[in-house]
Amino acid sequence: MTPEQARLLAAKERLVADAWRAPTGPVTDPRVVLATELIAKARRLISAAIDDEPYGVPRRLTQTDTEQGNCWQTAIACILDVDPSAMPDQVAIEQGSEKSSYYGPLQAYLRVHHGMAFINLHGPQLQAVRVEGLHVICGSTVRTATSGKKHCVVGLDGKEHWDPHPSRSGLTTHESWNVLVPFPEEWTSHSNIPCICPSCSARREGDSDFPPDAGGLT
């Protein structure tokens, strides 16, 4: 075990008991159980990645597309302190000819460049857990009634912290959270999904102008 792994394990043992609460009894939901095991370690990883400043968004970014929407991409970029253009293009993926979900490409990017993944928590799960630090909150906005689109903002300790939309108007409902965690070894089915961010796509095409760690944290 490396010193960093030992530090993370010690932090997990100190923090995990207080990081999650189940007010109505034991939690049996598999997602919550998995999150319980990982959340403290995730907080330490994110804190180290942004110079031990977990209680502020490193980059207060504004999404570049408000018509089709790239808020999810922008919110994650805020938390990880990366340029959104280094990530898979949310609009191109969701609005392209195949109209794919951004879920898979985002998970692949997080795994390849940051050794991380995100866990989705929905509905009753939001009442069963307490998250400390930065995460993503998704829900409706004042625009949803006319646009039909949901929105993502940066959350802090379960509350809205930064809205990447130019209006900064926030959410009217909280329907799910994305909690960043170290990539779980149990997710073997996700391990071989290729990353399609610009740097990985360029390397597959043999473009040497993009270094292997482009888009990631060093």
Image (cartoon, rainbow, N blue to C red):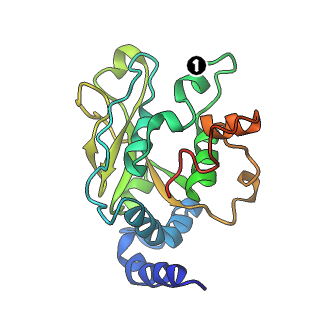
- Residue 85 in percent (x, y) is at 49, 33
Q: Is residue 21 visible?
A: no
Depth check, front residue: 146 or 71: 71
Neighbourhood count class around disc 1 (C-alpha, 10 Å): few under 14, some 14–19, many 20 upward: few
71 vs 27: above or below: above
* Residue pictured at 59% horizontal, 59% vertical: 115
Q: Position of residue 31 (x, y in %)?
A: 56, 60
Quarter-wise, where is residue 206 in the image?
top right
Closer to the camera in the image, 15 or 106: 106
Left or right: 154, with 73 as reference point? left
- The N terminus appears in which quarter of the rendering? bottom right
The residue shown at (29%, 36%) is 163
Query: Residue, x 64% and y 46% (percent of image)?
Result: 108
The part of the image, by quadrant, that contains residue 203 is: top right
Percent position (x, y) of residue 199? 62, 39
- Which secondary structure, mark 1? helix
Q: Nearer the viewer, residue 153 or 111?
A: 111
**Residue 53 appears left or right of 216:** left
Give the labeled residue for mark 1.
95
